[in-house]
Amino acid sequence: MANRASSDRPATVALIGNPNTGKSSLFNALCGGQARVGNYPGVTVEHKTARMSLACSTFKSIELVDLPGTYSLSARSADEAVSVEVLCGEMPTVAKPDAVIVILDATNLERNLYLLSQVLELQIPTLVALNMWDRLEKEGMKLDAQKLSESLGVRVVCTSASKRFGIAEVQSALLEILEQAPGSEKANSTDSRGVLERGALASASFPKAFLESVDELEAWFGAQGCPLERFQIERLLIDDSQAHSYRVIPKRISSEVAQRIATTREHLATQGVSIPLFETRARYGWIKQRVVGVVERQARERRVSTSDRIDRWLTHRWLGLLFFIALMFLIFQSITAFASWPMDGIGFGTQWVGQRVEAMMAPGPLRSLLVDGIIAGVGAVLVFLPQIAILFFFIAVLEDCGYMSRAAFMMDKFMSALGMSGKSFLPLMSSFACAIPGIMATRTIENRRDRMVTMLIAPLMSCSARWPVYVLMVSAFVPKQAVLGGWVSVQGAVLFAMMCVGALVAIPVAWLLKRFVFPGEPSTFIMELSSYKWPSFRVVAMRVWERVLSFIARAGSLIFVTSVLVWAAAYFPGDHSLVDQATAKLEAEQADPNADEAKTQAWTSEINQLKSDLISKSYLGLAGQWIEPIVRPLGWDGKIGVAVLASFPAREVIVATLGTIYSLGGGQDETSQGLAENLRSATWPDGRPVYTLATACSIMVFFALCAQCVSTLVTIRRETNSWRWPIFSFVYMTTLAYLGAWIVYNLMSFWLDP
Amino acid sequence: MALYPTTQAVPVEFLAPETEGVVVDLCGEEKNLHRLEELGIRCGCKIRMLCPGETCLLAIEGKKMCLRLGSTAEILVQPLTP
Ligand SMILES: Nc1nc2c(ncn2[C@@H]2O[C@H](COP(=O)(O)OP(=O)(O)OP(=O)(O)O)[C@@H](O)[C@H]2O)c(=O)[nH]1
Ligand SMILES: [Mg+2]
């Protein structure tokens, strides 16, 4: 690395630290990045790169890399492996770091220094950021940063990343370190770059026999044409053979390496070196020497803190669970309550735009494409923007206040009965927002079998893309009533029930998977709880904003394209000249103030008749006839069947598709009342309404259980490295969905209309 | 407030709520112990029981952590009485 430094390439600076110490907050503060921040361990599971706007004389620019949190460099889970890979320069897309910023939680110095002691062994210029500086005083502690810097031999900067305190100091310290990189002019200056002499490292106090073995192995690897760094060899010797460190060894020598390691370990055992525990002892010994006189804890009388008092309730055996369920229920109730007003606003907005376009253009294919295809389709989905924004507001508040890790603790009791652990709860919870980050978050689960099960059930959690479907069906077919003294809306309760369907079905699925597909020892559970805090406005606003943008982007791309395709399938190959002529006449008549009421009514129904004939003869209509026998048992007609089929790439598409189909197929009258009204007035050929409460519920249950999201399947494929698992999820979820919808439709039809 | 060790060492799960203990020994498979020590659970550290049970909630040197080790490892503590 010594000769890499030059001004024509960017410097890579990695941010590393224990989970939940504020790495992503610091990353955002340093480079205006948009990394996700949340108050529980395991928010970041991927590396994220952004450019810093700092002028550096030795490098072209500075690339900052945010990493997942880890307690040590012997990676046990996939997210920890990402951090180790980046630090060791094994990640193909990231250059080996030219400097690292190690973020320590100042309120938990000793434990955090463990990771620092390992990072220092990598001999990369290091800067220490003592974060959470603002919390020290509250915890009754004092810390002498100057003294710590002297005893560690690296630069130490005090920061409060979330309050943007100490950021300028980090920047200037970082520049100083980078500008003294070896090979640059200032390299000989006396100021430390944060690279310690070998003798000052914690590994210097490892047993002599161990160090000699490392020397031998280092020479041997060199002779094999595969030179490894000392630190990597140490990890090979200390970590067990499942560990990440073994991945750096080329296949050709892997069995020989395994043999050598085994004999070396036997030899060391005879020398009285107890692997792996000597490492922790040596490192903590090193830490103990460095923190002498650095931390001062005010001896104050131990009283029960507010946080303890809250925890006593929130983690109570069953009160805690009750609180969790009540909280979720309240959230769903308030989403339905708060969202209805802005939703109506957006609904009126899209209708207004549609009417303007109709007023400006003569009837014809282009007008139909704009009004029936794009505005009706995309508009039908955009209406749900307020719901998504409010949902993410609540999710962000929950994530940032520190409650999530408590919920995981409570759920562990329940998850352990299924053979899993509370670790699986956080990814599942985040799948309620979207399954993709949920599946990514399973990287934090150490146990591979647990991780697989969690990944396979994550898509059953009710993600936000299902909201439009539920809300559409609920608002159209569930009575708008309030019960229990007006406090609980029936619509909100049905929505909540739909949210639960997937999670409830996931329980037996997880049990079966764990029992028959991934059997094994029950997993253990260790997780740090984050401290409670008030959610930060910036974090919450960023999360909502990011989601709103991505929702609009999806509506503008995927939904837009499918709307156009569905419109084309429903418009062609019929001859629309009759409809267009009749519509033109009708509009001319309507423009006349003394229009004949009876005449316009007759024309309207004639147009509707023509339109529904055309749509039933279109490609879409033909597909509907083909699919109808399959979906009839679920209480659906061909149009629903086609709409559901079109929504396999992404769930929200069904709303757009139904919007287009009913806009093209002719509503009851020309000034349509929106999609919900159109659905209510749709009939079978014999005049019975297509949509009943039973049909609506069967559609909702189908959507609750079905794997209708290509991106989720692609993510599963990426995370498992095989097509087998996405295919498996698709098949099992679609089967479950069909069965579930069938059962619900028949039960409800029987119950409502025996 | 002086703290005197009084009783025999017990597994951490046996600590009564709101009582404290000092870790005196860790037993179990070594790779699991390695992990525990990396997480700061090691001999000499002080543990306060917040919420007992199969999955328990502990304060380890003041930091809250939940823990369910099953049969893979055992943390022995010497209870402290005020
Ligand atoms: N009081 C205080 N809170 C902070 C500080 N820095 C970050 N936080 C909060 O700590 C929590 C965790 O912050 P993140 O930036 O997500 O932490 P992280 O290290 O990236 O976490 P992982 O990605 O999960 O490893 C958030 O709620 C932050 O708002 C700080 O200096 N003081
Ligand atoms: Mg992070």
Image: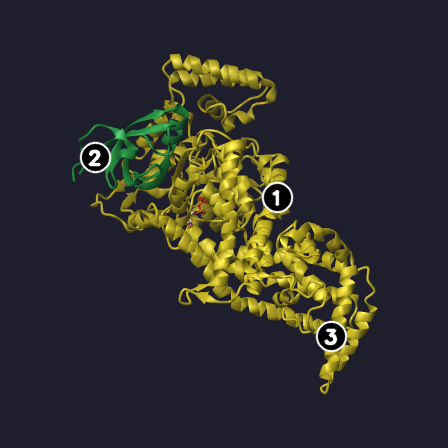
Q: Please name the amino acid that badge 3 sits on.
A: Thr
Residue A374 in view: no
- The numbered dot on residue A375 is none
Q: Please name the amino acid that badge 2 sits on.
A: Leu
Q: Are marks 2 and 1 in contact (CB under 8 Å)?
A: no
- How crowded is the residue under tag 2: few (<14 C-alpha within 10 Å), some, or many (20+)? some
**Residue in view at x 63 percent, y 39 percent:** A727
Helix, strand or loop for disc 1: helix
Q: Nearer the viewer, residue A56 or A346?
A: A346
Q: Which residue is mark 2?
A: B80
The answer for which chain carries disc 3 is: A
Drawn side of residue B53 relative to residue A194, left or right = left
Q: Which residue is mark 1?
A: A735
Q: Quadrant of the C terminus of chain A?
A: bottom right
Q: Reading the chain from its start, which is encountered first: label 3 or label 1?
A: 3
Q: Identify the colour of chain A in the image.
A: yellow
**Residue in view at x 61 percent, y 19 percent:** A252
Residue A310, placed above or below residue A351: above
Q: Identify the colour of chain B in the image.
A: green
Q: Please name the amino acid that badge 1 sits on.
A: Thr
The answer for which chain carries disc 2 is: B
Q: Nearer the viewer, residue A6 or A553?
A: A553
Q: Which residue is mark 3?
A: A604
